[in-house]
Amino acid sequence: METPLVLVNARDDATHREWLKHVYAFYLHDLSPFAKDEYRLSAAGRWEPDHLPYWLSQPFCHPLVLVRRSVPIGFAFVGRRPFPFLSEDVEFRLSEFFVLRALRRSGLGREAANAVFAHFSGAFELTVLGDNAPALAFWRTVLPSAAASPVRESTARGLVRFTFATGPA
């Protein structure tokens, strides 16, 4: 039997927090082609904007490192009420989701998404940059089986928003 994927809160674990600090830049780099004006490399060679300190400091933020067989494979950042970047009609927002490029298209992303949604129960939202076709394809494939309710999709201001419930149907 395969070892289950584990979610580790990086705020509570120094080793995984350090890993996350190193890997977060890869995530911003991956987003940069889809939002050139928002994600950029600074003159000092750092990817911006760096929201990681906020995620690591707020009690309503869950900076989760996705771990398989003791090896980190990615991360998911979930905000819960009173997270200020949350729509009024939901309790949770999956704000960031990242799987190391070498492990993509292996089923680990689907497994990680399912583990994250199984960890929280309630009304969720997530948004995807409208030009990010790979992410849109991933979520359109994963969400119908991961959600405990029908998935609603809407588009506004260049973002595709998905809303759904997790937990018991």
Image (tube, rainbow, N blue to C red):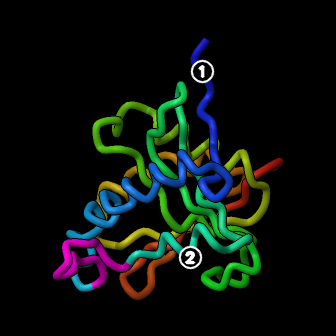
Q: In this view, does 107 lie to the left or right of 4?
A: left
Kindly identify the residue that appears in the image at 63 percent across and 43 percent down: 7
Q: Name which quarter of the figure residue 133 lies in.
A: bottom left
Which residue is drawn at the image coordinates 28% and 72% (left, top)?
Answer: 47
Query: Toward the viewer: 22 or 141?
Result: 22
Residue type of the residue flagged with mark 2: Tyr
Determine crowd level at label 1: few under 14, some 14-19, many 20+ residues with C-alpha closer than 10 A. Answer: few
Residue 79 drawn at (x, y percent): 65, 69
User: Residue flagged by tag 1: what amino acid is it?
Assistant: Thr
The reply to whether residue 39 is in sight is yes
Residue, far left? 43
Residue 39 placement: quadrant: bottom left
Element type where label 1 sits in the image: loop
> Residue at horizontal 30%, vertical 83%?
38
Look at the image and give the residue range highlighted in magenta.
Answer: 38-49
Q: Is residue 85 left or right of residue 130?
A: right
Q: Can the viewer see residue 140?
A: no
